[in-house]
């Protein structure tokens, strides 16, 4: 072993967690549960894992949720858990996109903090209602843009902020996938292709928002305007499966964003390149422990998670450098950072400085605005659209 | 998301787990605990996490272990847990190498199943005593050679067995690290450099055994003889920090094994290449989700975890292809497969076929024999030595 | 060696070649001359290598051009060579962009075939005049879009034409460089930054045209419309140094083109990705002997120049697969360094310091001793043998 | 273009070159001729290209060698060329290994300098005779260990000498190929498999000597002893096809050398890694323009041919950094294809089918239209513009 790893500091107790969605056959719910367990900061004690009551019951049993806390209606769960002394303190929402809004509202109304999968909801309007509710209740809200939690991504953000890249001139972000290159018919594909469940964006909402959020998170630049061309390459598909965008930033920088679900051969090719007038970085999700740092008139350097020359910004590093770390750990970092926030609120603990990095309502709302601007641009023949 | 992931089948209950070693400041203990949580098959309920009682108590509290089950003596833990109705069923041993043997013996004597970090113990003799004890008690024993649990490694093994590589001719395995290129003085480095705690091998025991085990696991070939040259490159180091070995296999194949802790610039460069008369594979731990498959007169192919053309052998795949998966998951797979074994034994469940892949006493003993043969060869001027 | 290489079929004679531009201090002229020598099909016998007559004369002497065929005016060269019985048959034009048109017209008017560096000229209008002249004279005209001549690029074109990618849906082409990230002042940079010499495009004309031509060559698709955002990132620069374009093709495909000379850290990052409904290819100029071929639901394949599965389309392959094409340059370096040694010996020249690096008899003898020691060791059962 | 390339300084004349071997059907002879032409320092004026006189004559004609200087006996060539005033000054020997010695002796006896392909000869005894002859005659002798001439290899050697790696501890060199994984029967394979023509080593002499020489050239270390295991993996093969060696150097360093011609899937995998107590380098022939430089506690750096941070040691760099050295071949292909077109037009030859791929006026005009459309789009606020 290269050296000692962090044994994540354990608080005196685990948070009582609920979950909406994520029953048998779902993908992202299991990922959330695993992430919640990873650093041992949560106990999953209640769930409305499905609206079909038999599925809800069986799914809950598999998660060691007591039968009396297995619900088939998230509103009922919110109400009844709020009445219990040992009720859930925080609830993860891992449903198709269309239920994010009502489920989050139900939890907030019941005084329960929320962890929500992305994208935030179905429209800017819904997003604004949510924002108001959060403001009103003073409750905490986390959005799981998990790619921001990779150590090298946080390092990249810190490098931009500390001036190592100079003034940012160019942003190239892409997110090609190939799994929808032909008509696909399964549970994962079908809700994503149904505007009523996925919202107005196809590839855009599903992965374009990740690409956008990642560039935002790292650069901190604000988009002034964009020019987007959405396409649907597979016959009969109601939503876009290919997204191509030119970006102009307020500081004069330029950008390009490509997200596609018909790019045959790509599995999950999220990749970000940022160029300033002093240096540039390149990071790709499929090799997340590496990042290239290039400087004017110097040899390019390979940065590795936990390796030489990193700042402290990389955050939670659970295994030594050279030990591949993954996707799940990114999720777990968000959960754990959010637990810090929650404990600070509920128990008066002093939060980790990193806790503030958890994406929240502002990022969610920004994402919704982004989606609407993209669609507006595209519908107007892919013309320049303010944002 | 690319597609649905496995939601690991959850059994009706979690196993009661104990741990020896892994208190504050330790590296591998935290990894084991995380791995145990990952698929939600264990509850850590007791621990002898340190022999210093204040450290043991504080470490246990951080792990949510009840104070009355925080021990500072593993023998006492074994005895008292065995007397409880709700005592531990299985115990993880994550101490320096020299305590693996006495701790494992104590658990087995108390009727407790064992998960043990590698290498097995300090000598073949100790290993044989352990083997006898396991035979005698009929208890289960797992050794965490975690690299064998990567999906692509299990796929490679299946490809060899199913004949896709033809007759194996060549094995090239290497494990370069650079962290001991200069004299290093910290907790991780110091026990590894002390023969009384680490045993007779330095780089050899620490990482050479991983390289050896990996080649064994994938090829199934038996080494007939080897020629090894151990060196200690840093002045004042008592144990080897560089291992170079020529291998001859019983089927006529040839091999080379290199393990080093003074190879500057390498973090954790475990890499295996196997060549048969029909095809060849190449896998590297730092990019564990990829494997190259090369066939006679065909274009090389890139295999990806969960991607096209994989058999079912890859096993537990928790995230879709293209989503980097890691080191921790490998550990978790071993824990979970072993939980299957334990549940089969204790509760009469039908185990997953994969459960049998967990390395056990035979692999541990084989590793000890390998170490002794290597040292013998080296001490005789690096001459050919039977194994 | 992997196998026999093509010895390029040699015709009974070499073509008589002239050159306009490419005198001392120029870059691309030397490349053209080297290329013309490579397969031994041309003799450079005349040149108007500079408009400064001293430079023209000295440059010609270095190229072994006879003094009476060293011109300082390309119009004079065209006229006088046309009058000679052994006059040039074909002329290479390697000047800054603004002279391409008049030099080409002068040659065509004199009945001389033309090889012209890219871009063609300064405007569509000039281009149309040239096209008319070529049509009228019936002479041949080549434009050195050199990237189309890489074997893997020709293979890619053939794959598109033979349907291996299906219907093309997406084109992603980029050409990032970083050498103009700051104000640069040298001969290479200055004419490229001067609209009067470079034409209306900066990065656009210099490298954007290569990216455009490469995508055209491989896909054969016609652009229907485009949306382009040109920027000049460095203060005081008259021409664009960053080009971002969205493309729409007549068949409904979409594309993105990025060319930049301010992308710090990139040397010459031309890269093309083409996605169809059956498959996709990816090729990058910095590793030109490799190409990735990805097909629906299959493992990605690595194609190599001259390797398995290539069609005949790759064309001129001068060294076996696996031999990086710098291989020839390595050989040439030895020859040239040795020529330095020889000239020093024979003619009393002062040799290049590097000439001493050419391996000689000592290295050869050392190699023979190595072979004998190896065989001796092996014959003695692979025992240690002194050398 | 990134910047100006070296226009190799041209001396006032070219050296008169002869060649032994390399007639029709040979591989390495054509490579030597191309290399000799590349920098325009040699004129090939005489040859004993084959011992079969019809082949010798036809091969000479293809090389533009005058009929009276086309020989079928290298001894006759040596004698008659030595008598001519314009006789060859230097002779390249590119025969199978067994003729290197007699041909070199014949040339040296005739006062002709020698360029000899590797390995030097058939035995240490022959080598010592050659060394004595060279000493006696005072003539120059070059051995084409071509891999030492790659710019990054020369840079690596300079880095070792200037202490950037510190004291060398470890050498890992490998040269896997796969082309003899099955019984192969062609001209290239057959002489290499015949001890009478190839000498006592198979893979050892053919590629093992390259690996050995490369490590020697870069490190300058002397081997004190070695332990070698030669194998012949393919039935019926008289010579070794797999070479595995442990090395001990006089300074205490350790090394491993692997050369194989049965490693399926490798084309020409020569790779060198050298580790000192301060730093390490890694270079692979298949990506010869790159080299990794790793230093203690620093981020690994990617060095590129002609890129930042190189010393002057890299020597002859013909194209700017980032231009893969196949770049020259691409240019040459255009020239040669166009020569085909020209010869068809001028002389009535039948052109190669590929000749039609040379870009011409249509491509140039298309490029001009592209430039104008891009500028128009950009000037209209980056709006969609027809093309």
Image (spheres, coloured by chain):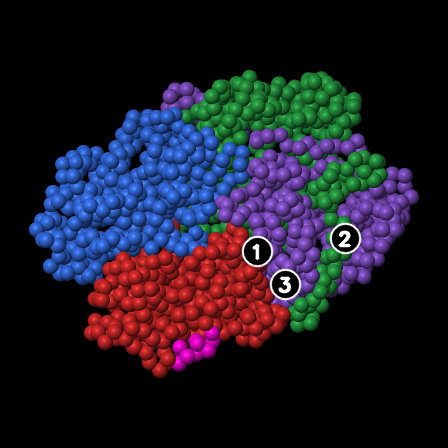
Chain colours: A blue, B red, C green, D purple
Q: CA distance from mark 2 to mark 1?
A: 31 Å
Q: Which residue is mark 2?
A: C362
Q: Disc 2 and disc 3: Cα gap in Å?
A: 22 Å
Q: Is residue A154 visible?
A: yes
Q: Which mark is residue D266?
A: 1
Vertical order, A108 against B108 (above or below): above
Q: Residue at x 64, y 20 (%)?
A: C103
User: Badge 3 sits on which subunit?
Assistant: D
Magenta residues, start to end: B123-132
C177 on left or right of A184: right
Q: Magenta segment: does it hold D75?
A: no
Q: Earlier in the sequence, mark 1 or mark 3?
A: 3
Please tell me which residue lies in front, A115 or B232.
B232
Q: Residues within 10 Å of mark 2 (few under 14, many from 20)?
A: some
Quarter of the image containing the N terminus of chain A? bottom left
Establish whether labels 2 and 3 are both on one chain.
no
Are there few (<14), some (14-19), or many (20+) residues within 10 Å of tag 1?
A: many
Place of residue B231 in the rendered image (x, y in percent of width and height, measured from the top left): 58, 63
* On-image quarter of the C terminus of chain A: top left
Residue B124 part of the magenta segment = yes
Q: Are marks 2 and 3 in contact (CB under 8 Å)?
A: no
Disc 3 crowd, CA 10 A, few/some/many (<14, 14-19, 20+): many
Which SS class for mark 3?
A: strand
Judge if badges 2 and 1 mark residues of a common chain: no
> For the residue labelled by badge 2, is the local secondary structure a helix, a strand or a loop?
helix
Note whether B384 is above or below D304 in the view shown: below
Question: Which residue lies under the disc numbered 3?
Answer: D245
Q: Quarter-wise, where is residue B310 in the image?
A: bottom left
């Amino acid at each position: 072993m290269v050296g000692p790893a962090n044994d994540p500091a354990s608080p005196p107790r685990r948070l009582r967690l609920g979950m909406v969605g994520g029953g048998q056959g779902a993908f992202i719910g299991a990922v959330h549960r695993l992430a919640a367990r990873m650093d041992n900061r949560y106990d999953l004690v209640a769930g409305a894992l499905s609206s079909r009551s038999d599925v809800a019951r069986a799914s809950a049993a598999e998660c060691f949720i007591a039968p009396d806390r297995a619900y088939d209606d998230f509103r009922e769960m919110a109400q009844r858990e709020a009445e219990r002394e040992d009720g859930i303190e925080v609830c993860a929402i891992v449903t198709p996109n269309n239920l994010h809004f009502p489920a989050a509202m139900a939890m907030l109304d019941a005084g329960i903090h929320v962890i929500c999968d992305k994208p935030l909801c179905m429209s800017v309007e819904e997003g604004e209602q949510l924002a108001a509710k959060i403001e009103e209740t003073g409750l905490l809200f986390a959005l799981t843009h998990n790619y921001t939690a990779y150590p090298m991504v946080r390092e990249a953000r810190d490098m931009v902020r500390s001036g190592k890249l100079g003034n940012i001139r160019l942003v190239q972000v892409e997110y090609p996938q190939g799994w929808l290159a032909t008509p696909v018919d399964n549970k994962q594909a079908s809700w994503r292709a149904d505007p009523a469940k996925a919202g107005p964006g196809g590839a855009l909402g599903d992965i374009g928002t990740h690409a956008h959020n990642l560039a935002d998170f790292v650069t901190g630049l604000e988009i002034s305007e964009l020019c987007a061309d959405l396409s649907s390459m597979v016959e009969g598909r109601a939503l876009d499966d290919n997204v191509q965008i030119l970006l102009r930033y307020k500081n004069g920088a330029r950008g390009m964003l490509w997200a596609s679900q018909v790019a045959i051969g790509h599995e999950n090719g999220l990749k970000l390149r940022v160029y300033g007038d002093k240096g540039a970085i390149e990071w790709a999700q499929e090799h997340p422990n590496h990042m290239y740092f290039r400087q004017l008139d110097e040899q390019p350097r390979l940065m590795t998670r936990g390796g030489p020359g990193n700042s402290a910004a990389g955050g939670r590093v659970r295994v030594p450098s050279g030990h591949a770390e993954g996707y799940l750990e990114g999720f777990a970092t968000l959960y754990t950072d959010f637990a810090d926030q929650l404990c600070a609120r509920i128990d008066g603990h002093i939060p980790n400085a990193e806790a503030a990095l958890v994406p929240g309502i502002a990022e969610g709302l920004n994402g919704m605005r982004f989606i609407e601007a993209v669609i507006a641009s595209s519908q107007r023949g892919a013309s320049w659209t303010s944002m």
